[in-house]
Image (tube, rainbow, N blue to C red):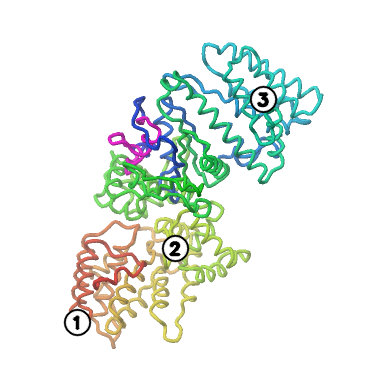
Amino acid sequence: MRVHRRLHGRGALFDTEPAGLAPRLVGLRPHQHRATRAEHPQELPFVVLTGGRGLGKTALLGELRDAYRGHTPVALINCEDAQFAGPPAGRPARSWSPVSQALLILAEQLAQPVTGAGRIQFPRLLSGLVAVAASGWEDADSERIRYEVRRFLLLNESGSWMIGFTGRWVGRTLADVMTVVTSGAGTLVSSAIGALLEAFSDSYVRRRQQRAAAWWRDYPNASGNPARGLMELSDHFRAGGTSREHAERHLVRALLADLSDAYTGVLPRMQRLGRPLVLVDNAHSAPGPGLRDAVLRDRSDGIADQVVFIAAQRGDDRTALRNAVRRSLPEVARRSDWSPDPAAPSSRALLVSLPPLSPDDTLHLVGAVCTDAPVPPQLPQATHRLSGGSPLGIVLLADSAAQNLPGAASLGELLTADVRLHEDRDGRPTYLELLDRLVPADRLDELTVLAAAHDHDSATALAEAVLPDDFGPADVRALQTRLVQEGLPEVRGRFVGDSFVRTLLLLRLHHRDADHRQWREAHETLIRYYAPTDGDDPSRARYRLHHELALGSPESAVAYLRDTFAGLDTRTWLRTLRFVASAPYFHAHDAEGRDFAARDDRRAAIALGHTDAAQVVPDDVDAVLHLRVRRLLHAVWQLTDPLALPDPKVRDRLRYELEQLSNLRPAGNALLWRASRDWPEDGVPDDEGDDSDDRDGEA
């Protein structure tokens, strides 16, 4: 999207003065053919941008490609593209792999001419790809074979003044290989390899290309014979397993050797100012791990290259990259402080975590999109609070605001309103567009329900009551693990730790049925799960009250908070208040669960005391305390709602109610007083977290 191009908060990667990480590695300023001092002259780190979905990793790689395309060799692949999921029609699996396909795609892009320099040729890689593919040509369609061979041979096109000769060489070599394939004489693989190597021996082919084709003589067990080396490569690839990994590693090495060759000699070094740049998106999927591990192993073994690899992946893969150097993006803004451990190949990776965007970044992004829309002054702040600084969330909410303001009155309405992202497509609800990008599609239905849960046990109870019978405790645990692997945080008290994703999932749960049946069923299940037990400790009670409030029933929560105010530890009481009031809120419904036609958020009116006169207070309780707790609960509920715009009047009322409660509880006066100052000013603390707020008497 156009907004991504602004890349707020990502200057540490792109800055030119002083140079950010990418210019220091590539040796060129973005969008310019001007050199800058290159970092790590001897050995480069394999950079991996890490983080969950929606942090802008794909946008960053796309911007890097655009910034250097035409200035230095650059290529970008997305490992989740369909072309890497399986071999093309008619091609046997024994002669194809995601890694071999990726190398072909990368080479085709890297070959393109740049300012001051012509095309790069890939004779080493071309020879290896032909040897690998030839094992799948037996009894195959000749047109498919012709297409594959021609595509491989074009990797050796120079694009120079000899382009006419190059075209004739490709045509003649193609004819020679096809003659061998269709004649049926001899072993097909060896005959195809022989025809190719003979073409490289042509007196018109430059000596550099001839030497490059002979590079395969150093393949293990080749005994100095390139044809034998290519046969060994083909056999290993066809065998699969670790043998194929061995072959793929040499194919990756061939690509890097061809790139190094293009920079060898006086003239190429003068013409090519920047290092080649290879960008790998969604590198957690094949062929990403295969490419990465091949490069890391060779660099660890002393096989040098000067290719800049920048990959992006969900999660940080602590198993395969356990020894990687880890930095946050701001930490590498001026220097990376990276140095590898000679004994650990994975230490040659530099993992760079992408932080969320700041409130200022959010303000600028919303302003850039909503140039013609009447934006409420609280909208950027509320957008940042809801999204947690997710670039994707901020951009889509801003798009929805630009298209739906002034009609939409809250973030909840912006999320449920349609947003049109492409001129040739109809709009869809914004929250569905976000979930498509933030949640694994194959587990969206299960996560929609389990988002209401708080841990493995409550999620299991919810799954047993609501989800199909074949989704059991093991599936719940596997889903928890997957969320962590994808980069979502683990947060105590939430099955889905990311607040933004959890809010979107609960919104989907609420809107799944016209009568909100599944919404009620999920919360009623958890109310039963947290039913009172002997002693009914506060930790269980607050979960139960949280879900009752989510169903629009505040009576039990008011009574519990009122009755425990004098006896419960003040810090525990405040935590119970803020957790109960973190219940998701959606507009009120009638007794049958149908939506009211009009907007109906009654929390502000209750918090401001507008409904006090109509309240019937039990005879045996302190009426003043009862009404004060009721107002306080609804004030916190409204102010902590991520889908509502902050209400300054409710914020002032929150301060007042906490002040008055501090006068009623001398033993807890300090905590209640501090809460009356901090909560309205800084926002009510999160409903869950560690015990860091125990220090210095903080609430």
Q: Which mark is residue 666?
A: 1
Label 3 and label 1: CA atoms lie apart by 86 Å
Quadrant housing residue 123: top right
- Is residue 6 positioned above or below 206 on the image? below
**Sequence order check, earlier mark of 3 and 1:** 3
The residue at which mark 3 appears reads as 149
Q: How many C-alpha atoms fall within 10 Å of the one at disc 2: few (<14), some, or many (≥20)? A: few
Query: Do tag 3 and tag 1 residues touch (Cβ < 8 Å)?
Result: no
Q: How many C-alpha atoms fall within 10 Å of the one at disc 3: few (<14), some, or many (≥20)? A: many
Give the image location of residue 55, x and y in percent.
40, 47
- Front disc: 1 or 2: 1
Give the image location of residue 91, x and y in percent.
70, 34
Residue stretch in magenta: 7-30
**Sequence order check, earlier mark of 1 and 2:** 2
The residue at which mark 2 appears reads as 594
Q: Is mark 3 on a helix, strand or loop?
A: helix
Q: Which residue is drawn at 43% across and 43% down?
A: 57
